[in-house]
Amino acid sequence: MNSEAIIVIKNLAKKFDDTLVVKDSNMTVPKGCVYGFLGANGAGKTTIFKMITCLISPTNGTIEVLGHNVTKNREKVLRSIGSLIEAPVFYEHLSATENLSIHLDYMGTEGFNIDTALDMVGLNGTGSKPVSKFSLGMRQRLGIARAFIHKPEILILDEPINGLDPMGIRDMRNLFLALIQKHGMTILLSSHILSEIEHTADMVGVIVNGTVVQEISLEEIKGQKDIRLEEYFFNIMSGGSISC
């Protein structure tokens, strides 16, 4: 993992009507890592992901991606990011191949070969099948393929293993590792499955009631005797702390 920061968030806040959903949040995502973003439902994880990917604008604070302010350099930032946020949406009547081709045209890049990308997510042989015929797990795999097919530097993945069976979860774990090691990507992901974050992530950030309250490497957590990520997470969520 590189010590160079690829995403830097400072004093971030987002208000919807009179409600502060994200407040006074700071995050630093090192280049070449898997950063696991943890928090309860409604804590603000997806809102922060949407601000990083320019889907919504911050109320206060700054977000820098690859040294660029996302509000001032939106187009440049978006070309460097691939994302899967909430349930993936496709052109249902079109095939998997056609959906990925449209995305590549939109991004203006060749990226991965479409058949190669489908094979990487375990969808080999399904390229001509209409997406309307895909199962939940297949749609999730296709959403992940669309996120990385244009070879972005950063992947933002919101609950990427939703709908996947244990074999699919293992496949995605191996895929994420390959995308980092072979293609130099950095991955920021959220998951409710703490054991999967423990297997996959290099470091974690914990958000509580809209504020990122902790960032720590998995090495530091595992270096503490008899402490697992699950215990660490629930201690933070309940207002405690564990010195690592």
Image: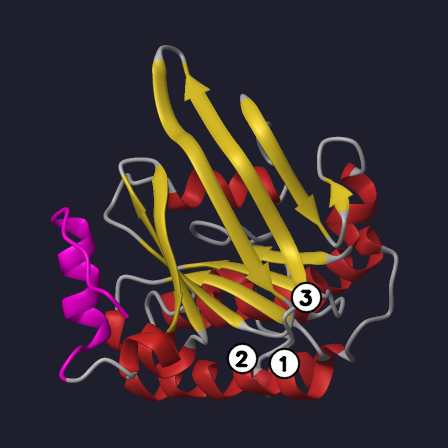
Q: Are marks 1 and 3 in contact (CB under 8 Å)?
A: no
Is residue 165 visible in the rendered image? The answer is no
Location of the C terminus by quadrant is bottom left
Numbered badge on residue 176: 2
User: Viewed as shown, does residue 70 lie left or right of 212?
Assistant: right
| Amino acid at dot 3 | Glu
For label 2, the crowd category at 10 Å Cα-Cα, with few meaning under 14, some 14 to 19 and many 20 or more, is some
Identify whether 155 is placed above or below 117: above
108 to the left or right of 162 = right
Q: Position of residue 239 (x, y in %)?
A: 15, 46
Residue placed under numbered mark 1 in the picture: 179
Q: Is residue 140 visible?
A: yes
Q: Secondary structure at mark 3?
A: loop
The span shown in magenta is 226-244
Out of 130 and 166, give the one closest to the viewer. Answer: 166
Q: Is residue 234 magenta?
A: yes
Q: CA distance from mark 1 to mark 3?
A: 18 Å
Please indicate whether residue 129 sits to the left or right of residue 199 in the image.
Answer: right
Please tell me which residue is depicted at 81% across the width and 72% down the height of the picture.
111
Q: CA distance from mark 2 to mark 1?
A: 5 Å
Q: Quadrant of residue 21?
A: top left
Q: Quadrant of residue 164?
A: bottom left
Q: Which residue was labeled with disc 3?
A: 4
Q: Residue at x 72, y 31 (%)?
A: 71
Mark in front: 2 vs 3: 3
